[in-house]
Image (cartoon, rainbow, N blue to C red):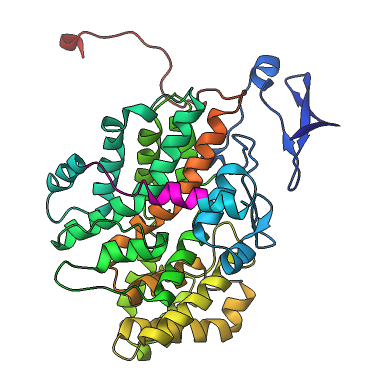
Amino acid sequence: MTDTTKSATLSIGGQTVELPVLSPSVGPDVLDIRKLYAQAGVFTYDPGYTSTASCDSTITYIDGDEGILLHRGYPIDQLASKSHYLEVCYLLLYGELPTAAQLEDFETRITRHTMIHEQMHNFFRGFRRDAHPMATMVGVVGAMSAFYHDSLDISDPWQREVASIRLIAKMPTIAAMAYKYSVGQPFVYPRNDLDYAANFLHMCFSVPAEKYEVNPILSRAMDRIFTLHADHEQNASTSTVRLASSSGANPFACIAAGIACLWGPAHGGANQACLEMLKEIGSVDRIPEFIARAKDKNDPFRLMGFGHRVYKNFDPRATVMKQSADEVLDLLGIEDNPLLQVAKELERIALQDEYFADKKLFPNVDFYSGIILEAMGFPTSMFTPIFALSRTVGWVSQWKEMISDPQMKIGRPRQLYLGANQRDYVNVENR
């Protein structure tokens, strides 16, 4: 980001203030209001920070109107179709696509750190058997700071690097163990001969009683889910990680905070909400009824998994995810799964309906990822943990970028106070 010759003039109370205008490499200009309070004695008011840039970043760019998502300048559809998750992790972490030697070294480092400390198993067994996997992940990831003392010093670049590798490597193991614990099956250790996505499926679905072979189509679909959720600019959970890290908190605590934020149904629970909607519809013959309800302005029902808050045209991740969904359903079939039958028919009808086309309510990445995960055999309670696993590299990349930023300050939003003015305390007997 660089200063330009442009500026904006703010007139308030007879006073005029010049605000610098900063120009990004791509996207809209930004008003620099850092000195606004000092110069004019006022704050800005922006609930949800929807019009406020809280940082500068070189990692991810989104243009919601045009349906564009870039990681370090590379379009997400190219990365999802031509690359794979660990290569995208390297790109997000270090800024450039790796050479063959760099990628091999990075993949080896990740693979060699997938096991967790054996004593951490006790944390899982301390949760109730019916604990939500996200509750388990929040606790276990935060507890990593109690085990890995040699990567807590955020002022040391090498310790930051070690913490980054550990988080990306161990998150699939933690998520898989949370799943295994929730269904009462024994934990399965990672295998160094499997790639990242295949290893996760192995840890989730293999059992000691018989051999489990990971299907390459399912592994590729899982890898795409990871890739398409790797980072998404300054969303709620990423902003949470940045805010937590601005206080100097250790990386494991910061990522645990991100997981907690992602747990919210308005953020990471969208694909779970989509599957719950499909269950509510129940059967293919009821789809017209729910399509009519979705068009009725007086009906609170909304089609989940269609449209997107950021993408006002189409979700660029959805095209690739649809391809994976078709491949997985062709492999596993939908004849015996009424939920998937409803999903496919709902997709067909919505794509042909002028109402949804006019409003640009196309199926989004959450619609297709939910279908894939359901077909693979994951319960809906695991959808958000898989999202957290995917997004860890984005959180870590944003955390590393912020820690290295010489402009970093502790986050301290202002407020519009609407409470009582100063008043004197009254003794209890006089109230």
Q: Which residues are magenta?
A: 105-117
Q: Is residue 415 visible?
A: no
357 vs 425: above or below: below
Q: Residue at x 47, y 52 (%)?
A: 107
Q: Is residue 212 left or right of residue 130?
A: right
Q: Residue at x 52, y 53 (%)?
A: 104
> Which is nearer the eye, 114 or 14?
114
Quadrant of the drawing holding the C terminus: top left
Number of on-image labels: 0
Q: Quadrant of residue 419?
A: top left
Q: Residue 352: horizontal and vertical position, in percent?
A: 57, 86
Where does the N terminus fall, quadrant-wise?
Answer: top right
Report x, y in % for residue 421: 43, 16
What is the x, y in percent for residue 277?
35, 72
Q: Residue furthest right?
A: 5
Q: Residue at x 40, y 63 (%)?
A: 197
**Viewer-proximal residue among 343 and 302:** 343
Residue 300 position, x and y percent, is 41, 67
Above/below status of 374 relative to 309: below
Specify whether residue 114 is painted magenta: yes
Q: Decide if residue 104 is in sight here.
A: yes
| Residue toward you, 253 or 160 | 160
User: At 34% across and 55% down in the image, what residue appears?
Assistant: 385
Image quadrant in which you'd find residue 269: bottom left
Q: Is residue 97 magenta?
A: no
